[in-house]
Amino acid sequence: MRWGTPLEQRIDETADRMLRDAAAGGVRAGAIELVVFVLKQAWACAFGAALLLVIVAARLFYPDGAALARNDLLTLAAVLIQMLMLMLRLETLRELRVIVLFHITGTIMELFKTDVGSWSYAAEGMLRIGGVPLFSGFMYAAVGSYMVRVHRLFDLRFDRYPRRWMTAVVAAAIYINFFTHHFWWDARWVLLGAVVLLWGRTVMHARIRRMVIRLPLLAVFAGVAFFIWLAENIGTWAGAWAYPGQVDGWELVSISKLGSWFLLMIISVVLVTWVYPPQKPEPTSRETIEAPPARQERPR
């Protein structure tokens, strides 16, 4: 069992105490598992939710003529959120490695995409590289934060996970295609086919407490991509950035962006395997409902 932050341990310990008096498979046990599932999902989204809240608050309340540009405010707020996550031990230094890598790869993509006109930011503030404000990299880092935290919170295990070197090749090809499709053949459909071939048989096992849920991994990718698309709509409405069709007035982000976010999930998953190599389910986790695992002494 992977150890998390003190708050995460308290959630698990409280749920375990409540489940001792609940009949396995009963309504009360099911309700407890549901509450724990929702709490853990919300907790995994903490970084992204906090950043999105700041973006919306800046749109609603921050004055246009303020001495500090709104983009600079968002960058400073993102740095503060990340520092608090570490200082309050809500995120581990081990996980920060992947989050920083998300930040770097995302910023590189932002520099290219804004240059070719895929989307744009307001030309304001000093904390930017070219036309890209530095807070943009933190939006990718928010995805990375969710991916590594949800892996730990639900002790994710996988049946029939593909070889990691093969997944790394596909992820690299996806990342390259985000750039090359602007001036060469767009290979996204071939890449989607490769993703289906590689992960089509993979089943994810996610432990809540007693309950272990099993889901096709491709369905999980699609679900995460959908929620990122929803967050993207909120971010563009708040004016954090804009697609060409939104310059003259906000409109819903094209549903076709779901495909892009689905492919981004592959890059995310491959980066996370650097911190958490995919593990096969333990023998007891093949049952849908089981007793909570015994706590072990935390390694020192």
Image: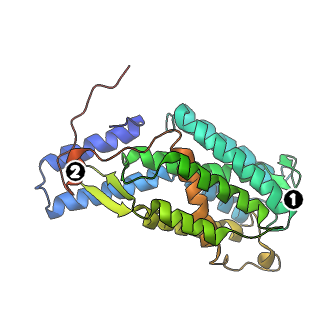
Q: Secondary structure at mark 1?
A: loop
**Which quadrant is the N terminus positioned in?**
top left
Q: Residue furthest top?
A: 300
Q: Residue at x 37, y 37 (%)?
A: 2
Kind of residue at badge 1: Gly
**Which quadrant is the C terminus positioned in?**
top left
Q: Position of residue 148 (x, y in %)?
A: 50, 45
Residue 264 vertical position relative to residue 103 in the rendered view, above or below: below
Of the two numbered discs 2 and 1 on the same chain, state the one appearing first in sequence: 1
**Residue 65 - label:** 1
**85 relative position to 43: left or right:** right
Q: Give the residue at mark 2.
A: 210
Q: Residue at x 81, y 75 (%)?
A: 244
Question: Observer-nearest residue: 162 or 221?
Answer: 162
Question: How many numbered marks appear?
Answer: 2
Q: Position of residue 82 (x, y in %)?
A: 62, 41
**249 relative position to 209: left or right:** right
**115 relative position to 11: left or right:** right
Kind of residue at badge 2: Arg
Q: Position of residue 37 (x, y in %)?
A: 34, 56
Q: Position of residue 227 (x, y in %)?
A: 53, 66
Is residue 142 visible in the rendered image? The answer is yes
Question: Observer-nearest residue: 54 or 163?
Answer: 163
* Coloring basis for residues: rainbow
